[in-house]
Image (cartoon, helix red, strand yellow):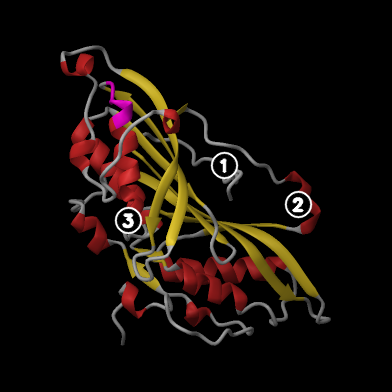
Amino acid sequence: MYEAVPEHSPLGKAVSYRDQYAPELLFPIPRLGKRQEIGIEGRLPFMGADLWTAYELSWLNRKGKPQVALATIIVPADSPNLIESKSFKLYLNSYNQTQLSGSDELQTRLVQDLSAAAGASVSVRLHLPDTFTTQRMHEQQGILLDTLDIEVDRYQPDPQLLRLDEQAETGAAPVEETLVSHLLKSNCLVTGQPDWGSVQIHYVGPQINHESVLRYLIGFRQHNEFHEQCVERIYMDISRQCHPLKLTVYARYTRRGGLDINPFRTNVPQALPDNVRTARQ
């Protein structure tokens, strides 16, 4: 029995692509280790989910004719495992020459296999070709930090960069605002390949200095960690350094291998955001 650690996943390794249904290709990785690294013990300080979009999904009908679809997959943040993305891609490719009775059978298999890998109930929504014209594109809304003229010399995440505005430190009233940056870049934990993303931070609490947030986010540029782990690190660092009453962190990463991953973490009970792609996705 192998240990489910990133080094044992298909990442960075030559693989033979399988085109017949193979759920065993899915590689779950426990969330616990990385959460302990950022100081999360016991009950989670947030709720949310990882919103995946699968753009390369195809199978055969019973007559052997290829079918295609898009899929939105929602993995709850409280699932014990995340699903390593290359294994997810290989698993989806295993449908390429698999005959199914229809999209309902595909959805049933996806829910069953992904839930087993995540260790929690995963939801799947298929978008068939007759609904492709309804697919939307929408940019994250908020105050764009990227226009700030700042000097940067740190490219590893440093929570000490985060600070409050001076008026907040003197007891000013809490503020509510949403900050957005497209300059988030991290690297794959195993291969070191770049992962590009945009991040939206909504909070209620003491005024956070905008330049400090931008420097902090740019600090992920040479940091190796999976998407989900980066977002949880951002959430915990802002929470500890700036003490907001309410906090939501939502990142949308560009796709790789026909998949994008969009982690959403919040301490405010609310509906999950619509999984709508941005221009870069």
CB contact under 8 Å: marks 1 and 3? no
The nearer-to-camera label among 2 and 3 is 3
In the structure shown, which secondary structural element does the residue marked by tag 1 occupy? loop
Image position of 229 (left or right of 66): left
Mark number, residue 215: none
Disc 2/disc 3 C-alpha distance (Å): 37 Å
Mark number, residue 132: 2
Disc 1/disc 3 C-alpha distance (Å): 30 Å
> Where residue 192 appears, x then y in whole percent?
37, 66
Q: Residue at x 26, y 46 (%)?
A: 154
| Pointer 2 local density, CA inside 10 Å: few below 14, some 14–19, many at least 20 | few
In the structure shown, which secondary structural element does the residue marked by tag 3 occupy? helix
Residue type indicated by callout 3: Gln
The nearer-to-camera label among 1 and 3 is 3
The verdict on residue 12 being magenta is no
Mark number, residue 274: 1
Q: Which residues are magenta?
A: 207-211
Count all numbered tags in the image, as a single digit.
3
Q: Residue at x 78, y 76 (%)?
A: 61
> Where residue 218 appears, x then y in whole percent?
34, 44
Mark number, residue 222: 3
Q: Residue at x 49, y 68 (%)?
A: 114
In the structure shown, which secondary structural element does the residue marked by tag 2 occupy? helix
Q: Answer with mark 1 or mark 3, whichever residue precedes in sequence.
A: 3
- Residue 31 vertical placement versus 274 (above, below): below
| Pointer 1 local density, CA inside 10 Å: few below 14, some 14–19, many at least 20 | few
* Overall secondary structure of the magenta section: loop
Residue type indicated by callout 1: Asp
